[in-house]
Image (cartoon, rainbow, N blue to C red):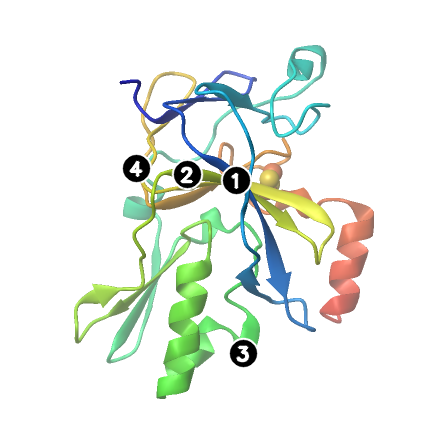
Amino acid sequence: MVEMKVKILSNGPYIVTGNIPLYKIVMVSDEKGHATKFKKKETISHSSKYSLCRCGNSKNKPFCDGIHAHSDFNGEEIASKNIYKEKTRIFETDRYKLIDAIELCDHSRFCLREGGIRNLIKKGDFKSIAIAKKEAALCPSGRLLLWDKEKNISTEKTFDKEIVLIYDDEMNCEGPIWLKGKIPLESSNQELYEIRNRVTLCRCGKSKNKPFCDGNHWMDPEIEEKFRKKWDLD
Ligand code: FES
């Protein structure tokens, strides 16, 4: 049996082996532009081994068509192999601990509604905590993990191994590739990244934290303008 794995090629695509199921999913946002949930995922047909575009220029997305070889795509991997172990910040109250790996943020905005996850945790009432738990659990990048210190449990869900392409209708753009269920991710120099339950990979080619998405798929003047208007930024 072929191992389920994602292997990164130097300045090239993600090579997926082991017949990992592939889906598309769309984020749903509220009137303020904060993401609240996902729509039902759609299946994308694929072979048992497939390659996913990493440079953002393929004419056969989400699959690679080899165009990276004819462009100036720089796929250099600069992210830490151990982000969660080494680079998290802690925010806590007597009852809850929020573990935050900020450099994994993929701008999916699940943690912003109802005043934001920190304010909700600070409030601490039943309803606020229920929303905070949802926000932490929905974050596809796995940036956020919420611990209940009294019960010693986290908001982490168990996922099957699957790959999901995120679409952001609100911002009218393609989001990252979501690896779910502890899929091993191997760098172009054969090192394994920390195996995590959820992680988001760049598929636009613009991330400054490759191979992970850093939200730079928003880097389009039209999208940025929309973002600024929505959140009243100057
Ligand atoms: S897909 Fe998010 S930065 Fe490239």
Q: Nearer the viewer, residue 213 or 176?
A: 176
Q: Nearer the viewer, residue 17 or 122?
A: 17
Q: Give the residue type at disc 1.
A: Tyr
Instruction: Give the mark, 3 or 2, whose residue is nearer the N terminus.
Output: 3
Disc 1 versus disc 4: nearer the observer: 1
Q: CA distance from mark 1 to mark 3?
A: 31 Å
Instruction: Give the mark, 4 or 3, whose residue is nearer the N terminus.
Output: 3
- Mark 1 — residue? 23
Q: Residue at x 56, y 17 (%)?
A: 12
Residue 24, horizontal then vertical, whole percent: 57, 42
Locate residue 55: give its quadrant.
top right
Q: CA distance from mark 1 to mark 4?
A: 21 Å
- Mark 3 — residue? 115
Residue 148, horizontal then vertical, whole percent: 24, 71
Residue 216, horizontal then vertical, whole percent: 64, 44
Q: Secondary structure at mark 2?
A: strand
- Mark 4 — residue? 195
Q: Give the residue type at disc 4.
A: Ile
Instruction: Give the mark, 1 or 4, whose residue is nearer the N terminus.
Output: 1
Instruction: Give the mark, 4 or 2, whose residue is nearer the N terminus.
Output: 2
| Mark 1 neighbour density, 10 Å: few (under 14) some (14–19) many (20 or more) | some
Mark 1–mark 4 CB contact (< 8 Å): no
Q: CA distance from mark 4 to mark 3?
A: 31 Å
Q: Secondary structure at mark 1?
A: strand
Q: Which mark is residue 162?
A: 2
| Mark 3 neighbour density, 10 Å: few (under 14) some (14–19) many (20 or more) | few
Q: Which mark is residue 82?
A: none
Q: Quadrant of the N terminus?
A: top left
Disc 3 versus disc 2: nearer the observer: 2
Q: Give the residue type at disc 3.
A: Gly
Q: Is mark 2 within 8 Å of ligand 1?
A: no
